[in-house]
Amino acid sequence: MIKLGIIGHRNHPQRLIDLIEKNKNCKLEVIYHPEKIIENKKGTNDLSDLFKCDGVLIASPNHTHLQYIIKFLNSSKVKIFCEKPPVNNEKDLKILEGLSSEHKQRIFFNFNFRFSDFSNEVKKQKNSSELGKIIQINMVFTHGLAFKKEYENSWRSDGKNNLHSILDTLAIHYIDLMNFHFGKSKDSIYLPYLNSKIGTSFDTAQILLKYNDGMVVNILTSYAAPLVNELSILGTNGFFTIRDNIASIYSPRDNFDKNRFFISPPLKDKNKFLMKDDYNDSLKKSLSYFINIIEKKDVFDLSEFDSSILTNKIIINLHSQNK
């Protein structure tokens, strides 16, 4: 039975705790917080209690990630599951890049959307003759977290330590997927804003990514809007959408009315696609992957570490556009 510990105990850490407790191949041994008393017999304020575990999940505020990673690498043999982004400044990123290969292969950064059906759809449409050459991808992912009572005093709204929390915790998923499937963008524009006027962190972020082949990606994420989960991919021969939990393909381009004017392509295919379920499923698959590596006494591929660092570099570059 794989023994796991976690840093963090509410909100997203609680999602991970729930998944651990449902996984028959592992057992949650320790829940750590540096200060708060956790009302659970597994709770502790002593970090060394985590050293006895086989794996540790770091689900703490982003600016604390590196200190925990270094501590575990130097004081234990645990495998490390660290939430994205790995770090939130260039100095810390250079420290990660300078780690030995042996240490890098003990770390898994949780870009869980790489394991999602959403990612599989992007990959499928990337090579689709029904769409042709992709011209533009548009993504809108918003919800109203900023208006929840607990948000104002949370680390996500703390502009001093997490000014770009909307970018670092939500938009980063989609930036990483674009990097994962299409390679590094040649240029980027980042437009953040505090729409809710609650807290001091940006709660809305619009990102524009430009690629060498002419493709443009627009990503809008917000904690200050109604729930919207939408994807549209426009190609030279058709377009693909995920909207209102329905995935649809419209193709081909060449459809005309009696006067030979273009009309909208016909619906080629339509399927149910539950975005919320996909997020939870990808998180489950990502955690299972981490546990499986521990079970096999294996190490993580260096290419996974390098890809995560590349995404982190893009994020830090976007930070620098709006200090």
Image (cartoon, rainbow, N blue to C red):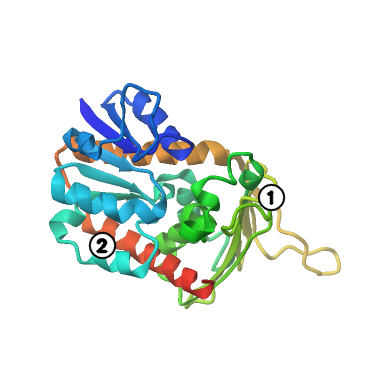
Q: Is residue 28 above or below residue 252?
A: above
Residue 192 locus on image (x, y percent):
60, 65
- In the image: residue 106, left or right of residue 146: left
Q: Residues within 10 Å of mark 1 (few under 14, many from 20)?
A: some
Specify which label sits upstream in the sequence, 2 or 1: 2
Residue 7 as seen in the image, left or right of residue 132: left
Task: Measuring from the top left, give residue 143's x and y in whole percent.
Answer: 63, 46
Q: Amino acid at mark 1?
A: Ala
Identify the disc placed on residue 320.
none
Nearer-the-camera pick, 308 or 225: 225
- The residue at 23%/38% (across/down) is 55
Q: Nearer the viewer, residue 255 or 98?
A: 98
**Which residue lies under the disc numbered 1?**
225
| Quadrant in which the N terminus appears | top left
* Tag 2 secondary structure: helix
The residues bearing labels 2 and 1 have C-alpha atoms spaced at a distance of 35 Å
Task: Decide: is 237 above or below 44.
Answer: below
Q: Image quadrant of residue 260?
A: bottom right
Residue 96's label in the rendered image is 2
Is residue 312 or residue 11 the one in the foreground?
11
* Residue 223 in the image, given as x and y percentages of width and height: 62, 50
Q: Quadrant of residue 13?
A: top left
Residue 323 visible in rendering: yes
* Three-letter amino acid code at the position of disc 2: Leu
Residue 45 image offset from top left, x and y in percent: 30, 35
Q: Is residue 183 left or right of residue 249?
A: left
Badge 1 marks a residue whose secondary structure is: loop
